Image: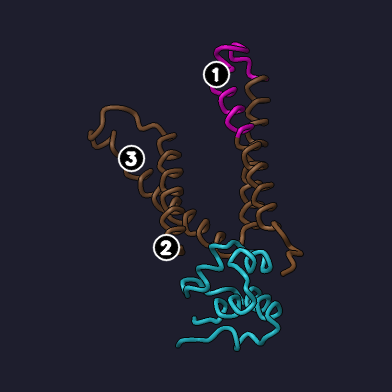
Amino acid sequence: MKNKLKVLRAERNWTQADLAQALDVSRQTINAIEKGKFDPSLPLAFKAARLFEMRIEDIFEDES
Amino acid sequence: MQHSQSSTLAERNKKSNKVIFTWTLAWVLSLALLAFGPKFVWDFAVGYSIAVIVVNLFCGYKMIMANKMMLEGLDELQRKLHMNAMAISLGVSMIFGAVYGLLEGIRLIDFHPNPSSILVVMGLSYVISLLIGTRKYQ
């Protein structure tokens, strides 16, 4: 699954550690999601959407 | 940015590790007491041995609950890595245990298989699986 986390994070000048703390996950998890190696659960995707004040589908894009 | 949930995950992990360490240590010590106590301390008195078995089982139960608490405190990727490692460890231990138990009977080894060897295999396969999984998602 593609996502815009890295771009959104960079726009706000946040580090992976900042975003990880805001979403209550590890930095490794943020890194894995940004690289597309790990797809977040629906609750975590909603949490990210609330944090960035965007819709889930504007952050995450299904590749299939 | 605000860190309203600052170190929440780290705090949870730290607390879980401390609880796991405490109960694992208690379990190992009670197991050692059960192994050596009857012979060297209380001369095989049944009452003492049963009491230590009860303590050992209680410590084992608390250790299992501590592990469960640790899993629940992890984030979703960490939990996935641990669950995968557990699945692989369980499978490897089962396969190893089944073959290892037959080795003496089919005369490939001339000593009685020690069940504690399975614990070593279980631990090693768990750690190796966890390391491979962690590397995969880096």
Q: Quadrant of residue B22?
A: top right
Residue type, mark 2 in image: Lys
Indicate yes or no whether the magenta region holds residue A37. no
Q: Which residue is mark 2?
A: B136
Mark 1 lies on residue = B36
Q: Is residue B70 left or right of residue B39?
A: right
Quadrant of the rendering where the C terminus of chain A is positioned: bottom left
Q: Is residue A53 above or below residue B12?
A: below
Boundaries of the magenta span: B25-47
> Mark number for residue B100?
3
- x, y percent for residue B118: 42, 40
Query: Which of the chains bears the disc numbered 1?
Result: B
Residue drawn at (71%, 69%) of the image: B1
Q: Which chain does tag 3 point to?
A: B
Q: Earlier in the sequence, mark 1 or mark 2?
A: 1
What's the mark number on residue B83?
none
In this rendering, do the residues under marks 1 and 2 share a single chain?
A: yes
Asked if residue B90 is positioned above or below residue A35 in the image, the reply reads above
Please count the marks in the image. 3
**Furthest-right residue in view?**
B4
In the structure shown, which secondary structural element does the residue marked by tag 2 occupy? helix
Residue at image point 61% right, 55% down: B71
